[in-house]
Image: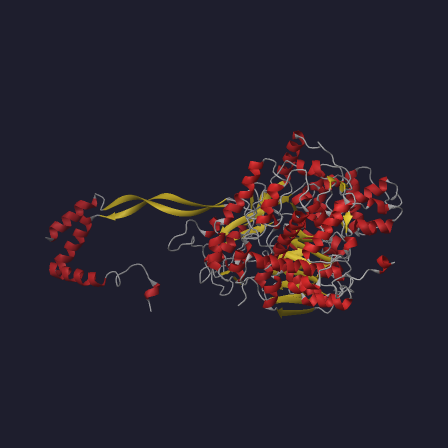
Amino acid sequence: MKKRLWQKTMQNKGETAVEEKVKTKIVKQIKVDIDKCTGCRACELACSAFHARPRYSSVNPAGSRIRVMIDELKDAYVPVRAGYYTPAECTGRYTYAIGSKEYRECGFCRVACPSRGYFKDPSSHLPLRCDMCESDPPLETPWCVTVCGSGALTYEERESKVTEEQVNPEEIDIGLESLAGRYGMQAIMDTVARMSKTYPKKISWTPNFREKK
Amino acid sequence: MRYAETGFNLEIDLTRGNIEKEATDPELTEIYMGGQGTAAKILWDRVGPEVEPFSPDNLLIFSTGLLNGTPVIGANRTSVDTFSPQTDRYSHSLFGGFFGPELKHAGYDKIIFRGKARDLVYLYIHNDRVELRDAVHLKGKGAIETAHLLKEELKLPEAQVAAIGLAGENRVYMATIEHANSSASRGVGVIMGDKKLKAIVVRGTKNIHMARPEALFELIRPMYKQIHDRKDCGDPMSHEDDEAFHVDNFAWGNARKRIKGYWNKEKEARWKALSDQVRNRWTSCYNCPKDCHQSISFPGQPTYFQKCYSKLTYAMAAYEELDFNYDILGVTQQYGLDGFSTPQVLAFAVELYGAGILTDADLPGFPETSRERFFYLVEKIVHREGVGDALADGVYHAARRIGKGAEAYDHNSMKKFEQVPLKLGMVNFPYFLMYATGEKMNITQIEGSYPQVAISDKIERKKFVDNWDAAPERFKKWYMEWEPQTHPSIEACVNICDWNEIMHYIDDSIGTCAWLSSFRGQFGGRPPYHIFNLPQFISLATGMDLDSDALWKKAARNRNLVRAINIRKGLRRADEKPPEDHWKKRDPEMEKKMLDAYYEFKGWNNEGIPTRKKLDELGLGFVSEDFLKRGILMENEETPLAEDDAK
C-alpha cells in the first residue's frame, strides 16, 4: 500500500498537481484627472460625512480620507486618497516637474505619516484609509466621485484576470490516503465528522477580530 | 446642540488686544438667521449713528452664512459688515471661497472686531487657539502674497486667509479684502486697513452637525451633477468668449460711451486665444460644482484669480483691450482694489486731465497712453500720493476735493458710490426702484429673480412660465402679460423690486451663492435655489421649522433692519435716486408714483422710513421705539420735515 502511494506521488510529480483557473475579478478604482480638478473640495466634505459615526452625522474635511492638495500659486490641484499608515517620517524633498508645473512629493503622497496632518482623525489622531465607501447595500460610486462635478474623479470598475489556484481532488486523495494509512480510515472519518460540526467557527483561517473577546 | 452653526462668536478688541469667545443666543438665529441678518442686529445694537466709520467704535464683522460648512451646495459665502467712510452708511459685502466654512470648523460663527491696533497685526485662529500677532513684516505685501507668506510661515498649508493689500493699509476707499479666489469690496477693506488688521488666518478641524443630515445628503446627492451640467446657473460670463453683451451694451471710459458694433468674430477669436493662453484653469469655491473663477498667469504678473465682469472693467474704462485688463488685474489684485469701482475712479481722473481740471502739476510725468496712465494712477492711489490721495476716496469725494468743476464729472455715482457703467435709453421702472431704494450699493446685489426681458414668442414664453418653479404665481401672470417695450404696471414693478431684493437678503444671511440663487433667475428662470425649495434645505440643516412665507418674512425683517440702520444714519427719500444720466429718457411723474407705491407696499412712510406698524409686525419693536425716541418717526407714522425742507 505504501509503495503504491509513493509511486502515485512520483507519477504526479511530472504533471501539474494544482490546476490553474483563470478568473475575472472586478477591481474598483478611482481615476484622477488633475487637470480637471477645480479645487472645490466637495469630495472632502462628502467623504468625511460618509465616514462619520453615525453615518452622515457630521462633516469635517479635516477628517476626510481624500484631500485636495492645493498650491494656488503653482496651479497644483491634486486630489489624493488616503493610503497606508507609516510611523516613519520622510524628508519629502523630491520635487516633480510634470509638464510645465512643479509638484512637491507630499502633493501626491497617500501615506498617513508623522510629517503632516493629513489622513488622521482630527480628534483621535488615528490614521485613516480610503475604503472606497464600502457599504451594504453598496453605493453606486464612492461619495467623492458622486460629488465631483468637474469629472476630476471618475469611478471605474476594471475587469482583472486573476489566476486562482484550483485544488486537484486527486491531490486530496493522496493526502487522505496517507493519513488513513497511518491512523486508519475510521479515525479520519471521525475527525472529519467532529470538525464539520464546529466549522468554520473554530478552524477559520481568516482572522476575525470581532469574535475575539 | 446647535445645528449648522457653532453658537459662538469671537469678540476681538484690537485696541487692547483682548480676545473673547462669546456664546450666542439661539433665538437670534431663529429671528435673523445668520450672516448679514445677525450682523445687522449687532450693528444696530452696538454702533450708534454718531459713530464715525473711522472711529475705533465702528465694528468690522465677518459672518459665516447660516449654512456655511453644511453640505448645502454653494453655501460658502462670508458676509463682511461695517460702516463705510465713502457713504457714511451701512456697508456690506460678501466673498466666496473657503473662509466661512473653515471658520465654522474652527468653532465660530462670527468674528467681531472693534478698536484699532497700534501697529499692523493679523489674527491667528487654529480651533481654540486665537491670537493677535504682529504683522509688521507683512507691511506693503500684496494681498495674495500675504496669504501665502502666512501659510508658509505658520506651516499651515490648509489654513484659509483673508488679507488686505497696500490699498487697504493706506485706507483707500476702493480697497478689498482678498481671499483665495474671491474678494469683498464696497467699503469693507478700508475699515480693515483702518483697524490695522492685515489678515485673518483660520484653520478649523472641528465637526459641524446638521439636524437631519441623512435626508439632507439624500437631497443634495443628485444636485452636484445637475448644477454642474446646467447652463442656467453659475456665472453666465465664465466659460464665455462672446463678450458682445458687455462690450456693446455697457459704457466705456468714465461710464460715457456705448460702442455699438465693437464686437466681431476677429476680436472674439483673438481674445479667446489670449484667455486660453493665460488661464491656468477654472476654479470653484467650497463645495460647489460650478467653476466661475479663472486662475490667471499673465506674463510678468504673479498668479491671481479673475471673476465675473472684472474681466473687462479696466479694459473698457481705459478704451483698451483684454490683454491690458489681464495685465492690470495682476497689479490691482495684489494691492487689493475693487474691480468694479476702481476702473471708474481711474477713468474719471483721465477725464479730468483731458478737461484740464487735473494738470501736469497734479500728475507729474503723466504718460501718453491710456494703458500707462492707468498703471500710473493706480500707484498714485494706493500710495495716496499727490492727487492720488483725493482719488483714493472714490469719485464722489475726489470730485469735491479737487473742485474746479470736477463735480460735473461725477455722473455715475449714487449715494456717493460708483455704479456699474450703464447708459441706457428709456427708464425701466423696476430697475429705477432697485437703484433708488437698494442698500447693497451695486445693482448686481439687488437685481436677479425676475427676467430682464420678455420672451417675444408667446408660445416659448408660456413654456418658460410653465417650468418657472422659482416664481410665485403672481409673477407668472405679470410675465405673461408683459408686452415687449412696455412698462409693467405699478403693482408689478413694486413686487418685482421686492422679490428681487428679498432673495438677496435670504442668500446673504444663509451664505448661498447668488449665482445659484438670487442673481440667477433673471437669466433662464431656473436657479437651483428659490423661495420654494430653500426652506427645506434650511430646515434639514438647522432643524428650524420653516416654510416659504416664514422665510420671506425673515428676509423682510433683515431688509427692514438694514434700512433702519441707514435711516438712523440719515438716509431719506431725497437720497433715493439713480445716477442722473443712467437713462436718457426719464419720467419724473411716473417715477414719483412708483416710489410712493413702493414705499407704501413696503410699509414705509413718505420719507422711506419703515413705519411703527410695519416694524412691530416684523418683530422690530426696538427699532420703532428708537425711531420715536429720536423723533425720526412721529406718533402718526410721519417723519418731521428736515430743517431745510421746512424753510
Left-right relation of A99 to B267: left
Q: Residue B55, image x and y in percent?
A: 78, 64
Q: Is residue B64 visible?
A: no
Decide: is B477 above or below B190: above
Count of numbered labels shown in the rendering: 0
The residue lying at 32 percent from left, 65 percent from top is A211
Q: Residue B277, image x and y in percent?
A: 63, 37
The residue lying at 16 percent from left, 51 percent from top is A173
Q: Residue furthest left?
A: A1
Could you tell me which quadrant the C terminus of chain B lies in? bottom right
Q: Is residue A105 visible?
A: yes
Q: Residue B21, image x and y in percent?
A: 63, 69
Q: Residue A134, image x and y in percent?
A: 40, 54
Decide: is B204 above or below B484: below
The residue lying at 11 percent from left, 60 percent from top is A186
- Quarter of the view holding residue B129: bottom right
Left-right relation of B304 to B89: left
Residue A197 versus residue B27: which sits nearer the camera? B27
Residue B600 versus residue B446: which sits nearer the camera? B600
Residue B431 versus residue B268: which sits nearer the camera? B431
Model colouring? secondary structure
Left-right relation of A173 to A142: left
